[in-house]
């Protein structure tokens, strides 16, 4: 390719050069012709002057008129001028001015003078011209003799020496005749030279022209070869391309299709040409190559791309990307289209699958929360546009945990799938049904009244209560609560809609299983619930803005009061600086499943603060940290706690984790894993609020806890209430029997404290011992008592 490129360039250069030489040659020929004419003209003046001079001298000899002598002088000067010019040019270096002056005297027209000079200077030695010039030179002595004769004639005439006159006339005529002969020779030689030069020029031109033809032919051959080669390589590329290619002629006719696309579609090229592409084009709408071609024509781009569906011979649907570009022909008005065809079926399938993953719930195959939110946004926008009303239904299965806990998660999943498929049969394509939580489903209903929505909610509840799940010999059905919210132009945003449905569902649950409730903004219950929802965002904000603080409450050991033990309690300060206790915000974040955020923050802050006070830590018996049952069930939380304690370089034995029972421990296996993990670090585990919840005793059996914290309700009657006393005593004994350390909570008076001690409980916590205070203050006070060196 490079070589042929080089040959091509050389060919072009040669052609140009030849053309230039040709032009120069033509100019030279023209110039030469003009110069020849100049010499011939000059010669004619010279010869005229010669014969005139002879005649005038002759007449003078006869008529004896002195004026004739002057005229003869003038004629002689013409010949002398030419001669002097030649002398000047023969001089080394040539005297050009003298030469020009000489030729001027020779009567030559001024336009010819330079040519005369040029020819003489450069061409006088050409073989043909040399003879002519020699003839001219040979006239020099004769010319001089004529000049001398003129003077002699004057003298003879003046002295009337007739004899001399007649001799001089004879000599004059003879000399003139000899000059005439030489002049003729000059003329002959000159014509010969001209012929020679002309012939040479013809030969040159012939050679030049032949070369031109030759180079042109070579060049043409080179071009043809290259065009063929590129056509060949295009054809080869077309045939063997790894990508499908077709060529399309006028009117969308298929001209050619390469092997690749034929194989893909399962038709031969001839078949495709016969049936046309449109027959296998599975796209709906504007299809066919003709349409594509027209689109390409209409677009200002050089090429266009689009995806289309095709059906292969074996019936397989194919997604093909066509990239068409125009190949213009030389004939006006006709252009071909070349299209690349890429099978993007696989990529398309993957992207659809991905889209499905992103927008659907893997377990049920229903839409997911994100997809629901998208359709809610659409409904909301529509409602604002045309004041239409829509609805969102949120269905939460009651006591679903029962299925999971008793029959295992696999049975739970199976149950959810069955419910999902039945709900989806009921709802069909009319609305978007989504699974938005583990046992929560939502339906976005377009253009419905609340009555319609209620009717559907009842049918959905019936479906849930009609779907049984089997576990061993056990065959049971669950119920579901449903919250409904209208989507009207007043709804602030989709989050509000979702929260409202959530609140309605929560209120339905409060009423009992299998209830349905419509959200009404003015409900008192609604505003209570709404404030809970607001708490969730407030906690997140407080965590971000570092407005969650550590408080701590001391725990008094009855046997050794000097042992330093306390419980860390969370406090939130709002932006106005008001303090809030966990009772206000923990239920909300627990319900929204985000309490692990708070627990992490408390663990992180506690470790950070203690790490700054090593002397305090050295004296510390145990720092209790509350962990919600929800956090407990989160493996990532366990990993976090383990890493944090290991990273703190403080002994694990300094910490005790209290498992609060504010939420049910849903996953016992995870809870055990957590306990095992912190035990491995030397930490202790306490069961909080022992005696109050139904499952307290169950947990005692299944969870390897070290400490029991007796619920505060029993401490109140420790001094005088026989029931409370009996419970406290029973727990104290049981604790000792099982080797557990027991702590009574909410001990508010000294009397209660003494009673509790007497009933066999190991330790007490409550206002009687100390109120919750900032952990930092507690550490500082402790350092003060012991006179620590450096207190931060
Ligand atoms: P809890 O673990 O049972 O903590 C004891 C609660 O009783 C504390 O309320 C404390 O202020 C209060 N209390 C202490 N002594 C007395 C008393 O003599 N009389 C009365 N009436 N109450 C007393 P607080 O701080 O409001 O905590 C409430 C609950 O919030 C805690 O109950 C605990 O379950 C939870 N909690 C607190 N901090 C955290 C935390 O960091 N993480 C988690 N998951 N839960 C926390
Ligand atoms: Ca606690
Ligand atoms: Ca407690």
Image (cartoon, rainbow, N blue to C red):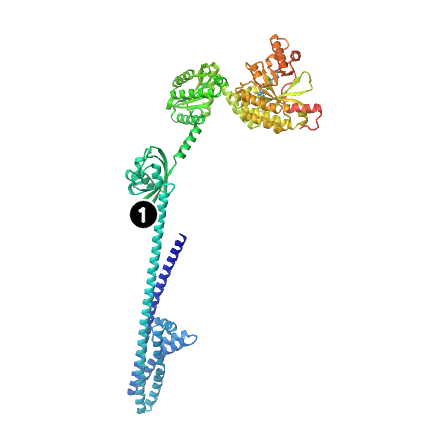
Where residue 391 appears, as percent x and y from the top left, is: 41, 21
Q: Is mark 1 within 8 Å of ligand 1?
A: no
Judging depth in this view, the residue of 619 and 92 nearest the camera is: 619
With respect to residue 406, does 182 lie above or below?
below
Where residue 346 appears, as percent x and y from the top left, is: 40, 34
The quadrant holding residue 601 is: top right
Lateral position of residue 585 relative to residue 176, left or right: right
**What's the residue at 58%, 26% (across, down)?**
641
Where residue 178 appears, as percent x and y from the top left, is: 31, 83
Residue 100 visible to an observer of this rendering? yes
With respect to residue 317, does 387 lie above or below?
above
With respect to residue 149, does 389 lie above or below?
above
Label 1 sits on a secondary structure element that is loop
The quadrant holding residue 694 is: top right
Give ligand 1's quarter of the image.
Answer: top right
Residue behind mark 1: 329
Where residue 777 appears, as percent x and y from the top left, is: 65, 24
């Amino acid at each position: 390719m490079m070589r042929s490129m080089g040959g091509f360039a050389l060919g072009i250069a040669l052609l140009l050069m030849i053309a230039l030489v040709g032009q120069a040659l033509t100019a030279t020929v023209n110039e030469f012709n003009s110069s020849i004419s100049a010499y011939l003209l000059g010669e004619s003046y010279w010869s005229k002057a010669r014969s005139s001079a002879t005649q005038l001298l002759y007449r003078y000899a006869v008529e004896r008129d002195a004026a004739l002598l002057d005229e003869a002088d003038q004629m002689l000067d013409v010949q002398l001028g030419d001669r002097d010019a030649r002398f000047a040019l023969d001089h080394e270096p040539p005297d050009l001015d003298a030469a020009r002056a000489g030729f001027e005297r020779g009567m030559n027209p001024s336009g010819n003078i330079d040519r005369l000079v040029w020819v003489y200077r450069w061409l006088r030695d050409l073989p043909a011209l040399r003879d002519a010039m020699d003839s001219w030179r040979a006239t020099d002595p004769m010319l001089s003799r004529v000049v001398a004769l003129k003077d002699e004639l004057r003298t003879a005439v003046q002295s009337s020496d007739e004899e001399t006159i007649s001799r001089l006339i004879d000599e004059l005529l003879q000399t003139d005749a000899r000059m005439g002969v030489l002049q003729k020779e000059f003329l002959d030689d000159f014509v010969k030279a001209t012929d020679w030069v002309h012939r040479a020029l013809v030969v040159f031109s012939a050679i030049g022209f032949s070369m031109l033809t030759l180079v042109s032919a070579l060049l043409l051959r080179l071009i043809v070869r290259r065009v063929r080669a590129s056509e060949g390589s295009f054809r080869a590329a077309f045939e063997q391309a790894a990508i499908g290619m077709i060529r399309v002629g006028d009117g969308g006719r298929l001209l050619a299709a390469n092997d690749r696309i034929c194989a893909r579609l399962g038709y031969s090229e001839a078949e495709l040409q016969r049936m046309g592409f449109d027959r296998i084009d599975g796209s709906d709408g504007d299809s066919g190559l003709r349409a594509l071609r027209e689109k390409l024509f209409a677009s200002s781009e050089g090429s266009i791309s689009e995806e289309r569906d095709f059906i292969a011979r074996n019936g397989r649907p194919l997604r093909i990307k066509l990239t068409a570009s125009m190949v213009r022909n030389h004939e006006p008005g006709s252009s071909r289209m070349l299209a690349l065809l890429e099978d993007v079926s696989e990529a398309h399938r993957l992207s659809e699958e991905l889209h499905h993953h992103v927008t659907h719930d893997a377990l049920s195959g229903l839409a997911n929360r994100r997809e629901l939110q998208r359709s809610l946004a659409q409904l909301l926008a529509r409602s604002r546009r045309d004041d239409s009303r829509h609805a969102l239904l949120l269905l939460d299965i009651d006591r679903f945990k029962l299925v999971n806990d008793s029959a295992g998660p696999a049975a739970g999943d199976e149950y959810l799938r069955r419910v999902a498929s039945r709900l989806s049969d009921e709802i069909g394509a009319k609305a978007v049904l989504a699974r938005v939580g583990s046992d929560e489903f939502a339906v976005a209903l377009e253009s419905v009244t609340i009555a319609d929505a209620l009717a559907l909610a009842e049918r959905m509840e019936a479906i849930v209560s009609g779907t049984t799940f089997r576990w061993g010999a056990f065959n049971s059905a669950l119920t579901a609560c449903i919250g409904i919210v209208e989507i009207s132009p007043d709804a602030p945003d989709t989050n509000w809609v979702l929260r409202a449905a959530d609140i309605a569902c929560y209120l339905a649950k409060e009423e009992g299983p299998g209830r349905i409730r419509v959200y009404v903004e003015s409900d008192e219950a609604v505003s209570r619930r709404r404030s809970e929802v607001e708490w969730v965002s407030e906690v997140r904000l407080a965590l971000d803005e570092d407005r969650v603080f550590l408080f701590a409450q001391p725990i008094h050991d009855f046997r050794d009061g000097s042992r330093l033990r306390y419980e860390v309690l969370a406090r939130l300060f709002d932006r106005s600086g008001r303090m809030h206790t966990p009772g206000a915000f923990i239920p909300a974040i627990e319900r929204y499943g985000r309490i692990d955020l708070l627990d992490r923050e408390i663990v992180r802050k506690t470790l950070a603060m203690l790490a700054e006070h090593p002397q305090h830590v050295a004296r510390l018996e145990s720092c209790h940290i509350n962990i919600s049952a929800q956090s407990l069930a989160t493996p990532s939380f366990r990993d976090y706690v383990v890493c944090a304690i290991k990273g703190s370089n403080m002994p694990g034995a300094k910490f005790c984790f209290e498992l609060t029972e504010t939420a049910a421990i849903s996953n016992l296996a995870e809870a055990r894993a957590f306990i095992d993990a912190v035990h491995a670090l030397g930490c202790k585990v306490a069961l909080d609020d022992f005696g109050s919840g139904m499952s307290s005793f169950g947990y005692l059996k299944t969870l390897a806890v070290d400490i029991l914290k007796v619920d505060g309700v029993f401490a109140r009657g420790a001094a005088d209430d026989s029931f409370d006393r009996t419970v406290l005593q029973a727990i104290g004994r049981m604790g000792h029997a099982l080797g557990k350390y027991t702590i009574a909570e909410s001990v508010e008076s000294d009397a209660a404290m003494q009673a509790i001690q007497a009933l066999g409980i190991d330790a007490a916590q409550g206002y009687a011992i100390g109120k919750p205070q900032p952990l930092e203050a507690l550490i500082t006070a402790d350092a003060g008592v012991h006179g620590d060196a450096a207190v931060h």
